[in-house]
């Protein structure tokens, strides 16, 4: 490898380390798990409509599209759509809105566009991929930030004795310890009763975002610099599992409402 190639490679590594994690939720395995769960709860009519738009791409594989294009500057305008800030003790309605948008507003926008009869198929495909991804984002608790640490990105910790941050632990750290594919992880989740499914589907998208506020005290029950690992995962893994399941069930509810 020549010196120029070594320099280019080093630059790529540096960029990868510096790019913030705020645009990632769950990582590919978590997002695809949400998509897999959603597919299991779609009506037949909705499933036909979804696959008319996506073609041969599954909901699970479509779920990572918004992260796949994050390096394309043509999509810089959607970077803030992945998250929202709601400080402790506040509500979505009460907070000052980001003029660039947020995950709650973006989900509503995608719902409206997907209900329109005038949007070309290729644009529908983009809007659907966005909706799938954003509902996953909404259910990663640290994508509803407190406003003081960029959703845990600035909360530095050790994860399995390696430098990390709280956001990354929730995005992918705990999920990766399971060493499961997205289909295996989806299959391992609970089978909620019909009553529980109906209860989860109640409320607005803003209400769903606000649920994360209640989860934050347990998430932040550590100190900066702490070495987190199996014990932290043992305490918080039930929450991860439930959030993945809720995300899939609620995504299916939104798609069923759009497509019948």
Image (spheres, helix red, strand yellow):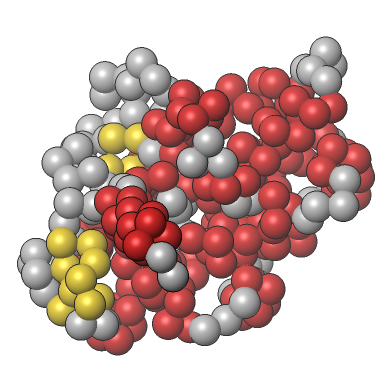
Q: Is residue 104 visible?
A: no
Whole-percent x and y of residue 14? 29, 56
Q: Is residue 115 visible?
A: yes
Whole-percent x and y of residue 5? 42, 60
Q: Is residue 141 above or below residue 71?
A: below
| Image quarter of residue 102 | top left
Q: Quadrant of the N terminus?
A: bottom left
Whole-percent x and y of residue 212? 35, 49
Q: Residue at x 35, y 35 (%)?
A: 84
In the picture, measured across the screen, residue 151 lies left or right of residue 53, that is left
Q: Residue at x 56, y 66 (%)?
A: 29
Whole-percent x and y of residue 235? 30, 78
Of residues 102 and 16, the one nearer the viewer is: 16
Of residues 236 and 227, the one nearer the viewer is: 227
Q: Is residue 71 above or below residue 179?
A: above
In the picture, measured across the screen, residue 152 lies left or right of residue 26, that is left
For the image, the number of numbered tags is 0
Q: Quadrant of the C terminus?
A: top right
Question: Please, which residue is most extreme toward the top here?
Answer: 118
| Image quarter of residue 195 | bottom right
Q: Residue at x 67, y 40 (%)?
A: 129
Q: Is residue 258 above or below residue 120?
A: below
Q: Residue at x 16, y 68 (%)?
A: 157
Of residues 152 and 193, the one nearer the viewer is: 152
| Image quarter of residue 228 | bottom left
């Amino acid at each position: 490898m020549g010196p120029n190639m070594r320099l280019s490679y080093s630059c790529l590594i540096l960029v990868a380390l510096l790019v913030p994690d705020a645009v990632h939720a769950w990582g590919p395995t978590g997002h695809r798990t949400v998509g897999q769960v959603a597919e299991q709860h779609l009506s037949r009519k909705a499933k036909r409509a979804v696959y008319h738009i996506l073609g041969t791409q599954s909901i699970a594989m479509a779920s990572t599209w918004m992260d796949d294009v994050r390096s394309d500057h043509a999509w810089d305008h959607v970077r803030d759509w992945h998250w929202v800030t709601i400080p402790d003790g506040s509500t979505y309605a009460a907070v000052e809105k980001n003029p660039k948008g947020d995950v709650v507003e973006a989900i509503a926008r995608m719902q409206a566009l997907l209900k329109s009869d005038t949007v070309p198929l290729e644009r529908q495909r983009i809007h659907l991929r966005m909706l799938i991804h954003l509902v996953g984002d909404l259910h990663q608790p640290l994508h509803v930030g407190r406003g003081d640490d960029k959703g845990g990105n600035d909360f530095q910790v050790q994860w399995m004795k390696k430098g990390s941050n709280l956001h990354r632990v929730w995005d992918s750290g705990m999920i990766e310890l399971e060493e499961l594919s997205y289909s295996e992880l989806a299959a391992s989740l609970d089978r909620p009763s019909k009553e529980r499914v109906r209860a989860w589907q109640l409320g607005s998208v803003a209400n769903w975002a606000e649920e994360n506020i209640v989860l934050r005290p347990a998430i932040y029950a550590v100190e900066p610099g702490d070495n987190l690992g199996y014990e932290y995962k043992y305490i918080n893994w039930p929450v991860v599992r439930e959030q993945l399941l809720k995300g899939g069930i609620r995504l299916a509810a939104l798609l069923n409402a759009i497509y019948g």
